[in-house]
Image (cartoon, rainbow, N blue to C red):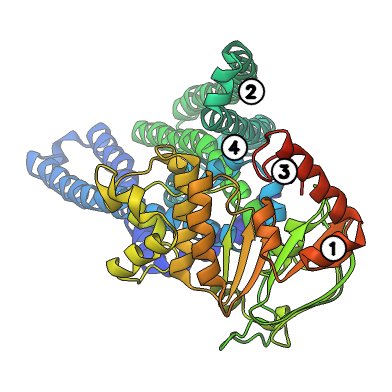
Amino acid sequence: MKTTVLLKRFLPYYKKYKKIMVFDLLCASLTTVCEMVLPMLLRHITNQGMSNLASLTVGAIVKIGGVYFALRIIDGLAAFYMAYTGHIMGAFIETDMRQDAFEHLQKLSDSYFNNTKVGQIMSRITSDLFDVTEFAHHCPEEFFIALLKALVSFLVLSGINVKLTLIIFAFIPVMILSCSYFNMRVKKAFRKQRRQIGELNARIEDNLLGNRVVRAFANQDIEIEKFRQDNQAFLRIKRETYLYMASFQDTVRMFDGLMYVVVIVAGGIFMVKGKIEPGDLVAFTLYVTTLLATIRRIIEFAEQFQRGMTGIERFVEIMDSTVEILDEPGASPLTEVKGNIRFDHVSFEYPDDHNSVLKDVSLSIRPGERIALVGPSGGGKTTLCNLIPRFYDATSGEICIDGRELKGITLESLRTHIGIVQQDVYLFSGTVYDNISYGRPKASREEVVQAAKMAGAHEFISQLKDQYDTYVGERGVKLSGGQKQRISIARVFLKNPAILILDEATSALDNESEQLVNRSLDRLAEGRTTLTIAHRLTTIQNADRILVLSEGRIAEEGSHKELLEQKGIYYQLYMSVQGQELGGARDGEDGLAYI
């Protein structure tokens, strides 16, 4: 992205802190004035001493010193404000941007997260924004000071000797153009660095989360080699960055030296010819030194500038990610939900690869009806369920709850009335209590305990060291698969939704736990619409109606008995399970694993 475009996106963040910014620039002007006064004082003393030493009394020198000391006190106070409050303003802006990025991420659909590495996302909202604090503070400040010093220096030096001033200032545009080439290369190199840091984060995250798999297959050496390659790639990018930075800084030093040569040679010639006084040459040298220090500071700031711009660019890329699922204009909350669900000629294909999953599905589910979804893997069972809470929007057709089209319902109210238990359980880092209460954060402790009892989780929780206050670890690693599943079910019990979606909810449970949970689910399902992606034979038999999905369509529909009589797809799956059970397979575990 162009720098101008990025700055336009960034500047609105100053609006909340414009008073701090205005006072910061005022302090910057005070420090600049204090610095620019010194050459004039030395010029006055030198010229006065050369022309009429007797007139230069001790009292006059002390007064000049007193004035300058007072200016330095002002300079110190102004500099303190700039260093402290100015940096805090930068931190505020960084915090605001990170908050905006995180809030925007909450609005993005599954498609975004399916195609973006978590490590890259984390880099964008953490390390990429670290440099924004310095950028937000120093960018306006440094350029304002540079402009002020250049203007004051030009006016003062022009008053002393116009020709020498023009000769010196003629070097500045050439210097800027020469440095711009390397500056652009540095910017590109920093962008590469940010991307590679994201790749490193993604590699580390992938390895740490899959550490058990790595060790189980004894593939540590392979993982080390993968990391070595990514790490070396990062090193190569840093070497490229430092090459351009060194060239950049060397160019600055060359022009730095040339300008001093001009001051010495041209200034000396002008002084010999009587065009300037010795004090004027001293002032010239000091102003050029100040000017060069300012230019050098701006050029050195260019590295920080590019870091900040790279961070802003990667932030903007997140903010420009399309929010595919959002409240439509005029959407209103869903209240007093009965649980009637209707699919009217619904088709769906994933937006990124256009893989068709559902094809012209029409379905009507009565309030309180318990529906089981079965069929071969990839038939569209999970996708059909994901369309109800609008994790995705249907490509065509219409889905209604209690006669209201989903897009006319606010997302928050829609999802509030839908409870989901997935096969892949995710527990947050925290306590057992924290994870169950996530279903309804304002619930009392008694309600949390009751939900755990209904899910068949209270008994094992009571045996934990700290019971409900037991820390479960990252992703619940300190608990078994069955324990994690029962906690996730308790979370939904606490939520008490009108519509339940059970995505192979009991697949990780042993027989005893499954029986406890199924009894609890039966109690919870009373009067509530329930969709179950079936894994176990018992779940299928207890359903009011079974839908067999195959190749994105409803191939068969009916009760367990009716489908067996049809001797179709369901009959074949059932007989396959029965055969495995006769061979000693656990009920439904393998035969319906792909259902």
Residue under numbered circle 2: 237
**Spatial distance from mark 3 to mark 1, Cα to Cα?**
19 Å
Callout in the foreground (2, 1): 1
Q: 304 or 569, which is in the foreground? A: 569
For label 1, the crowd category at 10 Å Cα-Cα, with few meaning under 14, some 14 to 19 and many 20 or more, is many
Residue that badge 1 annotates: 563
For the residues labelled 4 and 3, say whether their Cβ atoms are less than 8 Å apart: no
- Determine whether label 2 and label 1 are within 8 Å by CB: no
Q: Residue at x 35, y 45 (%)?
A: 36
Question: Mark 2 vs mark 1: which is more N-terminal?
Answer: 2
Q: Is residue 454 above or below residue 480?
A: below
- Residue 122 shows up from this direction: yes
Q: Which residue is mark 3?
A: 593
State the residue lying farthest toward the front: 582
Mark 2 or mark 4, which is nearer to you?
2
Mark nearer the viewer, 4 or 1: 1
Q: Amino acid at mark 1?
A: Leu
* For marks 4 and 3 on the same chain, the one whose residue lies earlier in the sequence: 4
Residue density around tag 2, few if under 14, some if 14–19, many if 20 or more, within 10 Å = some
Say which amino acid is labelled 4. Ile
Instruction: Give x and y (percent) for residue 10.
Output: 56, 58
N-term-proximal mark, 2 vs 4: 4
Rounded to the nearest angstrom, the CA distance separating label 4 from label 1 is 86 Å
441 left or right of 361 in image: left
Is 293 left or right of 12, judged from the image as shown? left
Mark 1 lies on a secondary structure that is helix
Image x and y of residue 417, in percent: 56, 76
- The residue indicated by pointer 4 is 172
The x and y percentages for residue 150 are 49, 46
Three-letter residue code for mark 3: Ala
Distance from the alpha carbon under mark 4 to that under mark 3? 73 Å
Q: Mark 3 falls on what kind of element?
A: loop
